[in-house]
Image (spheres, grey):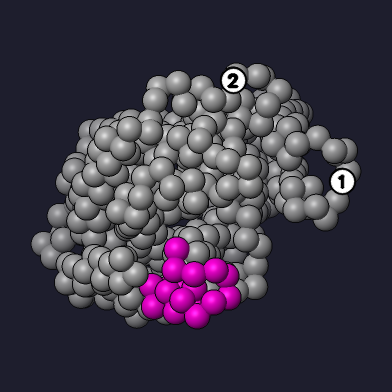
Amino acid sequence: MDYALPLLVAVVALGSVMLSANARHQGAFFRGQSADGQAPGLLTLIFSQVTTWVFARSLMNAAILGFYYGLWGTLAYAAYYLSFLTGGRIIDSLRFEHGFDSVQDFLRARFGRWGTGCYNVVVGVRLISEVFANLLVIGLLFGVAGSQGYVLAIVGFALVTLFYSMLGGLRASLRTDLYQMMIFLLVLVLLLALTFSSGHFAVADLMFKPFEIDEPGPILLLVALLQVWSYPMHDPVMMDRGFLADRKTTSSSFLHAAWISSFCILAFGSLGILAGAHAGSGEAMNEVLTRLLGELPMLVFNMALVISAMSTLDSTLSSSAKLVAVDMGVLKPEVRNGRTVMALFMALGLGFVFLGNKDLFSAVAVSGTASMYLAPVIFFSLWGKRRDIPVWSYLVSFVLALGGAVLYFTESSGYSALLGDSHKYTKLLWISAVVLVGGCLAFWLGGLLTPANQPPKSRNNALGSAAG
């Protein structure tokens, strides 16, 4: 079976390349339109939403959290997928209640250059982290870090995905997402069938870790419930797909993506729970699963990771191109410029793989904490329709969230111990709570101190400088 996984990967990659027609106009490359200008349909949007969020890093995280923290760890990670429900509400408000064509347009109208500048930094980091984290998972499937197999797998995978992404842009991403998601669902069903028929799975295994509120699993669940309000708004892949179709199609796609993706995460996470329930002293998750299930199910397990990683990478690259060439306006929104941006983001992702931090969940947690500066924006400015929030409130929220993200990273990586010797998820819970409450307090005070019916000066100045 040494060559089975590379062969299967090659087949999926070839199919993806064949589906990626050359994008000849901006509508296809940046907005996913067909040759005759049609928006993507419901099934395409649903599968694209799911497969770009059920990516290799997510599947690994769900399984690893299940392995260490039982059902509660996997439930905590699945709770992040409630983001489809909050994300759908955010999109509906942005597009159909406020009338904006992008998150950046809304933030620019409310907070000027500071609004878009802070946001673009956060989403840029998010996109780069998606590239490096999924490449990292691929490398570890083919060898230990630094080995020849590890390096060749990462570089080869990156080049193939970059090629078909540059060829067709968002249109190619949507088409391949549909194809890759269909294969992923078949692989997942096969994997579950092999697992349940192995004779090693029992319902009691799901509860091998009892519920205790001060344990890492339940604590992480609380963290997810705090972060899920703002998390979708800082994910450009999800947000981009919210601006492609009509209101009914868009709303339905978010709703169905929520339950389908949650099922996929819980199903994959159950494998980690199974491994945790049967793990011997010092055994790693993959070793336990191989011992229990054998080589064929593990091949299927790895195949699911590869498919999800490929789907996420092409979507991330297409969103990167749109971010820089359309939303930020750094370059002209031309297909050639979009392709250049894709190559740049892939290069940055590869750089982080070979030089950066290898803690998969840290990247998600840091990103999620940084995104929390958007929670008061959503509560007050978007859903609350407040136009009297000054720029300083926005900046206080941003600085709090960014500081919280940096603090969590240093605490979880062992570079600092300012918060004592508590578990890193306990620290993350306290940081998230402080960031959320502090940001909302800044917005409340900003609105309170701004005279009624008088736009804040700070925003006027910002808008004036933006117009100039």
The span picked out in magenta is: 141-158
Residue, x 55% and y 56% (percent of image)? 126
Sooner in the amino-acid sequence: mark 1 or mark 2: 2
Magenta residues, dominant SS class: helix
Q: Is residue 276 magenta?
A: no
Q: Is residue 302 left or right of residue 106?
A: left
Three-letter code for the amino acid on which mark 1 is drawn: Ala
Residue, x 87% and y 38% (percent of image)? 420
User: As displayed, is residue 88 above or below residue 128?
Assistant: above
Q: Residue 410 location, x and y as percent?
A: 78, 52
* Residue position marked by numbered label 2 in the rendering: 210
| Residue 297 or residue 354, whichever sits in front | 297
Residue 417 circle label? 1
Residue, x 38% and y 33% (percent of image)? 200
Locate the C terminus and report the quarter of the image it occupies.
bottom right
Q: Residue 407 location, x and y as percent?
A: 78, 48
Tell me how far mark 1 sits from mark 2, CA to CA.
29 Å
**Eye-nearest disc, 1 or 2:** 2
Three-letter code for the amino acid on which mark 2 is drawn: Pro
